[in-house]
Image (cartoon, helix red, strand yellow):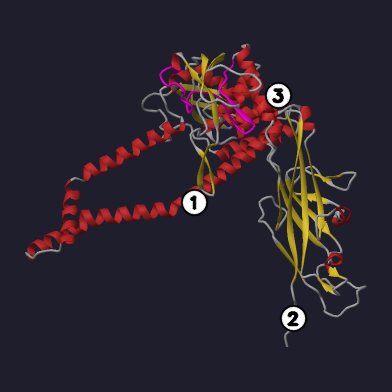
Amino acid sequence: MPGFTYVAVDKRGKEKRGNVEADNRERVVEILKNDGLIPVSVKEQGVLNKEIDFSIGKKVKPRDLSVFCRQFVSITQAGVPMKEALQMLSEQTENKWLKRAISEVLLSVEKGNTLADSMRGQADIFPPMLINMVEAGENSGSLEMAFSRMAIQFEKEAKLKATIKKATIYPIILIIAAIGVTAIMLLFVIPIFIDMFADLDVEMPAITMWVMNTSKWVTANWYIILAVIVAVVVAYKIIYKTEQGYVNKEISKIKSGQTVTQTTKVNDGVITEYPYKLPDDLTVAGTHGQYYQLALEKDRDINGVSDGKNDIVVWYCLSGNYYQDSPNDVRNNYYFYSRGNVIYTGVGHSTVTGEAEIKLFINAIVAAANVTAVKPEVNFITELNPAAKIEKTRYYATDQTSWNQDEINVLNNDQEFFINVKDYNMVSSSLSLEDQSKEDMTVDFYIGGTEESNKINDKIKEMIPYGNNVEPVRLSDGSFHIKNNAYCIALSDIEHYLWDDDAGSYLPNCKLYVKVTSTVSLYGKNITSVSEASIDLKQRQLFDLD
């Protein structure tokens, strides 16, 4: 695709210069106008003025995608229409590849296409998971929720990559330093000693002779070593990309939009057997391979050890015509696969009319409906922040050992506690609005035990959420209706729960419990899960020192 150099002015009259790739000059003008710029001059780049870009591929980091999702939610929640939101994002985004992709998505949306289909046209920028979530959000009317949850996913991915990168920097530096020192010794230092020992005309130890001979060989063949290193690096990059599904012989066919209508069965199981038994060869609507795939060959790990079970089960692969040379290639030519109650498909843009493919869809729904919902996660934390550390113990101290029970003796009688609640039932967001309306998550608090007599919801006046999220709602039974977030509760008169009348002293240990009940509707079936956490309230003894 040819490159163009442009000069334009923005709405404030400020001149802007840059480079852009497009099919022709008219397309460049269109892109600039969509970015709110007025073209002054547009020239095709020649050999001498062509922009040199040393980056390999279109680099869009998970952090860029996370910011994009967060900004989209913020703008649309402010009441801005989707087209205007995309226009604003295309102007604000710094990453040039993502900026260009958003502009293309905006053009596609303006032509009447859905947001998901428009993003699918930029599949080299937007991951399949994001596109699928956007499509589910559009169908269910929960687009903002889909973007919010994908923002969280991209943030986790970015954090993981940053952690791995940070952990590998030090050993890489050590390895490079060691290689550098070794090379200097073999190429420059040891040859000096070789000449010195030659003048002495004495017999050297075997290991010394080995080192000297190695130095001679390296000095004479350094270019061969350099060539081998370069070849290894290049080979690794090629193999790595191939393993990830980014590079294979079908990519050119995918880009040209060539499709097939045939698939072959890879595995037998519930999706192929119940309630309909499906054939080994399935005729489907016109579809094609995908640009990017998950690591289908990987196994899940338990405590760092593979359990020998695939994370993803592939059911059907593309076959015939352009894919007949690599049958049942589950990495590059997949058509239909699943993980738990989440179904992935490589279906293209054609209308599904075949009876067999409809039966496959019904089987998938039935299988997903029988999967148990994931339990929520809840923890006491040290402060009102979802990123805060977990708090296991809270200490209290008394003011005096001898006192009147009508008085307050606990130094901090009113205490604040913080909890963090996470619900991972993302699949429910891709269902109907009716199913989403059935989603519910409530929280209850207990002290001393989780029996009903130990519930203290009525002693808590309010729950304060982190950020600007919706306030918790107290239900008729005293429970709090909440969403994924961190919350603060204020517990007054804590001394009431810490004094043991029978013993006539304070309890050395008392537990405060939080119980979260999550209800989701998976394909019309309500599933309830309960999780709880506790924090120890321990007495800290005070001593007077003379």
Q: Residue at x 77, y 56 (%)?
A: 513
Q: Which mark is residue 139?
A: 3
In the figure, 125 relative to 300: above or below? above
Q: Is residue 444 above or below residue 204?
A: above
Task: Indicate whether 260 appears above or below 55.
Answer: above
Residue bearing mark 1? 166
Q: Nearer the viewer, mark 3 or mark 1?
A: 3
Q: Earlier in the sequence, mark 1 or mark 2?
A: 1
Residue in front for this viewpoint, 129 or 330: 330
Q: Is residue 371 left or right of residue 435?
A: left
Q: Pointer 3: residues within 10 angstroms few (<14), some, or many (20+)? A: some
| x 46%, y 25%: residue | 329
Q: Which residues are magenta?
A: 323-349
Amino acid type at circle 1 is Lys
Residue under label 2: 543
Task: State the CA–CA distance, disc 1 to disc 2.
Answer: 45 Å
What secondary structure is found at the residue carrying circle 1?
Answer: helix
Residue 350 on image: x %, y %: 59, 14
